[in-house]
Amino acid sequence: MTSSGTNHSEPAGPGPSDGAPWAAAWELLLPAASAPARARGRTLQAALREAVRTGRLAPGTRLPSSRELAADLGVSRGLVTEAYEQLTAEGYLRSDRGAGTWVGDAVRAAGPRARDLAPRSSGARADFVPGTPDLSLFPRTAWAAAHRGVLAELPHHALGYPDPRGLPRLRIALAELLARRRGVVADPERIVVVSGVAQAMALLGFVLHARGLRTVGVEDPGSPEHGALYASAGIGTVPLPLDGEGLAVGPLKASGVRAVVTTPAHQFPTGIACSARRRAELLDWARSLDGLVIEDDYDGDFRYDRAPVGALQGLDPGHVAYTGSVSKSLAPGLRLGWLLVPASLSEEVVERKRTMDLGNPVVDQALLARFLERGDYDRQLRRCQRAYRERRDALVAALASHFPGTEVSGVAAGLHAIAALPGRYGPLDRFLERTRAAGVAVRPLAQYGTAVEDGLRLVLGYAHLSPARIRDGVALMADAVRD
């Protein structure tokens, strides 16, 4: 670092050559120096967020003063000051007058969240971490037959650059599927084929940012990835609480956001199904300020106690962006999903998709289209529904046997369940320590939100486990915590 002086409220920070904790993140900040002048601020903020989220800048790390970092990067001090202030407002950093700028302690939760994206460890004797379907149910024979059929029938010219929205054949098949199974108002012209829900969220984030939005609301507790995806587009997130009917409307209105992400069919992770009254209230809120509800229908097809609740989008396609994927029904590694946007956003989303990747692979799109058209996808959904319902029943029965008094909340749906264990098995820290030592991987509900959780509430994934493995895993967990 240079010795050009310090801000009176910021002590000098060590430079990258000093082996300081933040030196490992130094190269992530360099693109800000070479970025176009108008983009340097956004580039620096994005690089700092990435360094904090990935752990390259650990909680408690002191950052260099704005004067020193500006001198080293060759940018204006005001640009660095603005970046520090923005990330402090978002919770990534904290600034103590007279003591400098530090990486915030609140981002300690980013470590486990980032590990959610890593390949599942085979070291655990029982793994109840949610998020993964049973990949052994992937229909290899039917998929291979569809692949051969596609390669035989696909004309040469179809292998050129595709329509960024997706192949018309696939969009028509998706429109029929979503209208029939999810009650979506599905115009093939407004369906965009994407690389999963993650890309759908990123696309919407970039479009909303270009329109001037700087914050979106997210459910708390909720999916840990929503915040990271919108942050990559330069948009902050406002955590919003839930009540017994879904996303609480009072705090939503008070937050001042104009867009909100929600999982109304089966809230992740609490398992709440949004009530009819709450659905109407959310749409009234969106209409009142011409806002946007972003519906993540991540496992809407998997309801076991009744027919699945239809998508929120069907009630007001002009104010709801709807997204889903085959990640839970087929396999997340396929990277195939869909985004259905209001007409007012369609052109901007399609153009952003075009500049992002020129469209999804043609053969994969044609393959999924054929799979849908021939009824293979419906057969796969029925197969998964039978298997996952059996596994949920096995989990509930095992908990009742080994942890008497446990309450399983949320609707009977999806690939995970919320279990509130009796307090005698706590406190939570001791419970997690003992189960971890026994080789049982579990996640507490508190890890998925900012609200303070009391008691033992666990998010237990069961879809990837056989009924026998579920019973053995719960028994092992009980043995680990029994006094």
Image (cartoon, helix red, strand yellow):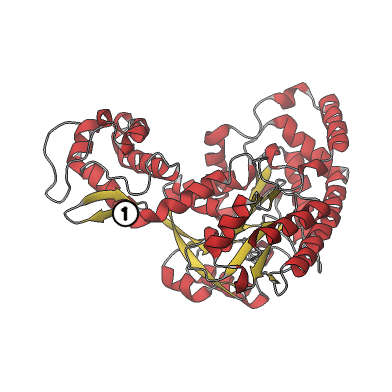
Q: Nearer the viewer, residue 168 or 245?
A: 245
Q: Is residue 25 visible?
A: yes
Q: Residue at x 84, y 40 (%)?
A: 139
Residue farthest to the top, as pictured: 156
Residue at (75%, 49%) from the top-left corner? 464
Residue 476 in the figure: left or right of residue 213: right
Q: Which corner quadrant holds the N terminus?
A: top left
Q: Nearer the viewer, residue 340 or 475?
A: 475
Instruction: Please state the horizontal and vertical placement of residue 6, each as a whole percent of the image.
Output: 13, 42
Q: Where does residue 343 sit, x and y in percent of width and height?
A: 59, 54
| Residue topped by disc 1 | 88
Q: Is residue 212 visible?
A: no
The front one of 70 and 475 is 475
Tell whether 203 sits left or right of 184.
left
Q: Residue 193: percent from the left, percent from the top?
A: 66, 42
Quick check: 128 left or right of 227? right
Which quadrant of the view contains residue 448?
Answer: bottom right
Q: Residue type at mark 1?
A: Thr
- The answer to which quarter of the image holds residue 269 is bottom right
